[in-house]
Amino acid sequence: MSRGRVAICALVAMFTFAAQAAPALAKKEYKREFEASGPSVKLETRSVGTEFLWVFPIEEHKAVKVKCAGVEHGPGEITTTENKTQSFKVKVTYAQCKTKGQKGGHEEVTVSPIEWEFHANGTASVLNEAKFKLFQPGICTIILTPGQTVGQEEVEEGKKGPENYRQIGKSPPEGLPEVEVKTKVRTHEEGEEDGIEFEGEGSLCETGEFKLEGGKLKGNMIVSAKAKETWIGFKEELLPPPPKM
């Protein structure tokens, strides 16, 4: 057999072995949890220099786009067992929210506070009914469905959810850490999966006058402890692979 044929056969054998071995490769598993300085710590939130962008698809290829300048205030609480937990709650009020059309028209929007529960696995829950309402009555009101958990589908498939957490600062005694919450969530009309569910009311929502791509929620914020000498942190640890059988 020529050297060329030997090399080709070796390559074929290598790729065949790799294809057979690929399914046996262990998926990386992580342990993710929030930490805090006590059994119950009061929290506050602030935005991180970026706008919160909400895009709600109302009709096919049409959407309402809402930009909020940031977080006005956001009180919350984290409750731990031995200083560790899988979730915390915050009540976020979004500030200076406006809707924008393709031609540059702006309309102020009032957004009621949204009660979030953030989970260490990357999912988030909307706990209350929240409304996005234009100042003119009857134009458009967008209502977020309460009691929904967003991102469960991704987590069940072994992927990361729409919430990404990162600890900022060192843990005591070197410092008092905070947690950055980076959100990238889809929005879908009520009854659909894989994103924040909502329903629209009013003439603008029904006619889809705004023609913008949607839907999504994007934005970053920092969660910190409200009182001095208290803190909140986040820990992600790569778990060792399971023993070979």
Image: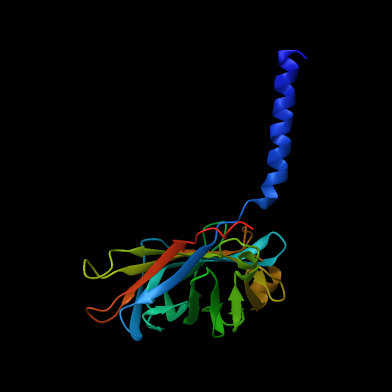
* Residue 80, horizontal then vertical, whole percent: 40, 83
Taking depth in this image into account, of 235 and 102 the one nearest to the observer is: 235
Taking depth in this image into account, of 146 and 159 the one nearest to the observer is: 159
Q: Quadrant of residue 232?
A: bottom left
In the rendered view of the protein, which quadrant contains the N terminus? top right
* Residue 26, horizontal then vertical, whole percent: 61, 55
Q: Is residue 37 above or below residue 18?
A: below
User: Can you name the residue that lies furthest to the top here?
Assistant: 2
Q: Residue at x 65, y 77 (%)?
A: 200
* Number of marks in picture: 0
Answer whether residue 158 is visible to the viewer in this image: yes
Q: Quadrant of residue 39?
A: bottom left
Query: Along the horizontal axis of the image, is 184 left or right of 226?
Result: right
Q: Is residue 26 above or below residue 141?
A: above
Q: Residue at x 27, y 64 (%)?
A: 170
User: Can you name the residue that lies furthest to the front here?
Assistant: 245
Taking depth in this image into account, of 73 and 101 the one nearest to the observer is: 73
User: Can you name the residue that lies furthest to the right here?
Assistant: 1
* Residue 2, horizontal then vertical, whole percent: 75, 13
Q: How is the image coloured?
A: rainbow
* Residue 145, horizontal then vertical, whole percent: 62, 81
In the rendered view of the protein, which quadrant contains the C terminus? bottom right
Answer whether residue 111 is visible to the viewer in this image: no
Q: Quadrant of residue 70?
A: bottom left
Taking depth in this image into account, of 18 and 117 the one nearest to the observer is: 18
Q: Residue at x 35, y 80 (%)?
A: 43
Q: Residue at x 68, y 45 (%)?
A: 21
